[in-house]
Image (spheres, grey):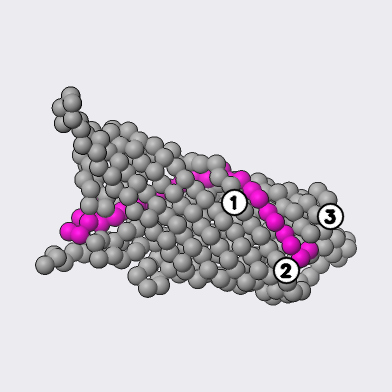
Amino acid sequence: MKAATAPHTPVRLSPKLGPFLALLALVPALVVAPANAQSDGDAINTRIFGHKHQISVGAAWQKADVILFAESQSGASADITLNDLDIDDSDSTFYFDYRYRFKERWALAAGAYTFSASGGHALERDLSYNGVDFTVGTMTEARLEADAYIVDLLYNAYESPSLSLWVGGGVHALDLGASISGEVSVNENESSFEVADDTLLAPVPNFRGVGIWTLNQKLALALKTGWLSANVDNYSGDFIYAHLRAVYSVTDNIGLSLGYQYTEIDIVEERERGDLGFDVVLQGPTITLGFSF
């Protein structure tokens, strides 16, 4: 009979929102439209955001704070950080967005975002992950992946020449994976090799909001935010993100933007063989190229 164990409570990471909040603090000053905001607003809304189709590709330089655990059937587990595994906490990744404005006030949006990192060294403390024990001195190799796939239906709740607000929701699929391998020499001729690997894919509903502030005929601020509760079936936790961008209209169909993105994932899957959990914070600057037609 399996011994009763206390449920594992994920450690909530302190959000490191300094750069994002500094950028966000500029919004009130920047969104005060000039006297000719009416004509400027019409121009940029048509040039960049008024087309039926919009495709955006971008790069993000993300820094990660991660805590993960995977309990064994006995209930044993311990929080593991990137420092424990000597995994690089930064990564340059690409992301993709597509928006189809099929009605004046309705749009369908889809996107994909990724993060991956790897590393390894001799362990400085004992670790246990997914039923596999790694002792001090074990040479390890480790990998972490965090991918998000998003599909949303958006409604244009408010529209003026200088401000556009969209609200909606849809489905996120979070693909989170971690693996740890360790090799321990028994003698000069023999060694043992252990691998602990698990992946979590959690399709969950979400809510999204998008705000676009026109500054002048060429420049606008776009803020995209999202939240979901992952309390579905055997999953619990939440997912939040925010992406603030300054968008420059290069031509009638091309826009270039610089921004800052913040994502926090706190997901636990309850399993018969032991809970699996990820507590991940990703943040960093972005650059995006958009095509509208």
Q: Residue at x 73, y 48 (%)?
A: 256
Instruction: Describe residue 78's horizontal placement relative to residue 216 as left or right.
Output: left
**Which residue is disc 2 drawn over?**
101
Q: Residues within 10 Å of mark 1 (few under 14, many from 20)?
A: some
**Which residue is disc 1 drawn over?**
95
Along the polypeptide, which appears first: circle 2 or circle 3?
Answer: 2
Question: Magenta segment: does it hold 60?
Answer: yes
Q: Residue at x 30, y 37 (%)?
A: 140
Rendered position, 162 above or below 23: below
Instruction: Describe residue 174's horizontal placement relative to residue 293 as left or right.
Output: left
Q: Is disc 3 in contact with disc 1, using a CB cutoff of under 8 Å?
A: no
Instruction: Describe residue 72's horizontal placement relative to residue 180 as left or right.
Output: left
**Which residue is disc 3 drawn over?**
252
Rendered position, 281 above or below 90: below
Q: Amino acid at mark 3?
A: Asp
Along the polypeptide, which appears first: circle 1 or circle 2?
Answer: 1
